[in-house]
Image (cartoon, grey):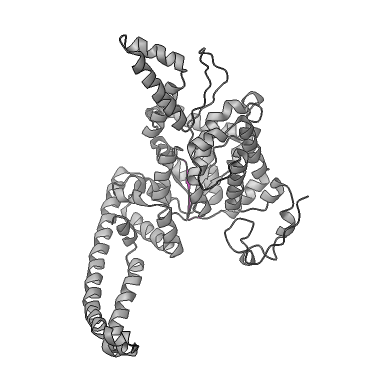
Amino acid sequence: MTKKIKLGRNDLCPCGTGNKFKNCCSNKKDWDTILTKNIPTISENLTLRGKNILFYNLLVDALELKNKDNIDIKTIKKACTPKAVQKIHSAVLAVWPHEKDLQRILKSEADNDAALYIGHYEPAAMIRGITRHSLYSKKIFVVDTFTDPRMVRPEFNPLEHPDKYLETTLKDLRLWFTLFPWIEAGIVNFIKNPCDFDAKLNYECMMTSQKRFDENPDMEKYIDDVPEEALEEMKEWHLISYPDSRIREMLKEFKKDISPEEIENVVSMVHVKRDNHPYFVPFINEDKKQFRDSYLAIKSGANFEMAKLIASSINSSLITDMAFRWEEIEMDHSNFMIKQEHWNSFSKAFQEIGISFLNNSNIDYALKIRKQNYLSEIRDFLSRIWRDCMSDNLFDEKNIKILEEELRHHLKEAEIEWGNIEKKFFKNFGTAASAIVSSYPIIAKGSAEYLIGSLGINGLTNLGVMWHEKHNFTKKYPASFFLKMGK
């Protein structure tokens, strides 16, 4: 048994909220004892953020990474051995021990200021989606992509055949390491799929989604809707997977007069690409024989039916960058069981409006909005203008154009008002600055009280009014938050 730990009142609470122990679980849970238990027991007492942080630490431990602050793709690839793959997928079971624990988490996360992301899971695409929607969503939930060993047959189980899961595990690891700063900040959380605990429910969700596709053959046009970055990585992966011997043969077949030096230059380039590719691991030897199976998947977290279950449980809207997902949402939006269903249609419009600097958001800006308690005001502002924009058909493409025009109008209004405040501020500050400059020799001698006399009560009052106006500007003009991003 682990030695009992005595928590201090000012220590961070072990549950993972990020709050101090005295303001969180003190006198509510016996964490001194809980922390001596096994991981599943500890996990049953964690918040969702706490589970995410625990799982991240288990990933680091499984990979045996010593320096958490300097982790690149080469380091991860070198550390991602079959043994590490087994440990990682064992950690999935430990952090999410049973369905009852998931239901506890879903209940605790019910928050109608949240959104569930079910878009492309390639890191660059996901970051684009998260940054834009973090401007108005308090939290963004992402369905975890790590395969749950409970849900696959033995021949496909990562615990029994970890060597087959090297590539897929590397893709999942890259996503976790990319998003961890957002997780640590409490903005993004990976959530477990309820279907991972219920094979029958999983089957029913898949069949319902398949039926929707069968009944709407036009949706097949979206099958190839894959981010360009993902396609390029996949193409490169196929090319560099050939052994050197086969690459030499292909070069000779392609160009009959190619020189030996040119061939070796290409082979050397392929070696570099193999080292730098995020999920390439050799599986064909120089004799052109495959020595292990390789599973590689393009994921989107959950299908639409599964996503509806999660969104209904946590009362969240849905966000995506997938065209066919928007088609599904539009077809079925009347069946959503959430209080603020209009956020689904807003999310689509906000995703597609052509104001490019909305993509300039980053984790620091998202945290700034939250620390200054402006998130609810921005959300109320966007909700208000969306209600004015949207027609009876919530997903009408015309609504997107109207929203963009309305938002640009508010941005221009905020810009003009900010300019007026700046003019007044510098006009008043100019007089005060002259007084300060003229007073400097006396102030330097220790007569600081002379500064007050020079400025006078009116001067100080005017400056105070200007500072007050600037402080309240963002509250009066919420669009100014977006205006600042464009600067």
| Residue 24 in view here | yes
Residue 115, magenta (yes or no): yes
| Front-most of residues 319 and 417 | 417
| Left or right: 450 in relation to 242 | left
Which image quadrant is residue 262 in?
Answer: top left
Residue 107 on image: x %, y %:
60, 52
Q: Residue at x 40, y 49 (%)?
A: 131
Q: Where does the magenta region start and end? A: 112-118
Placement of the C terminus among the 4 image quadrants? bottom left
Q: Residue at x 45, y 50 (%)?
A: 341
Residue 44 on image: x %, y %:
68, 50
Residue 165, magenta (yes or no): no
Q: Residue at x 57, y 35 (%)?
A: 79
Residue 175 on image: x %, y %:
49, 40
Q: Residue at x 34, y 60 (%)?
A: 481
Which image quadrant is residue 306 in?
Answer: top right
Residue 128 on image: x %, y %:
39, 44
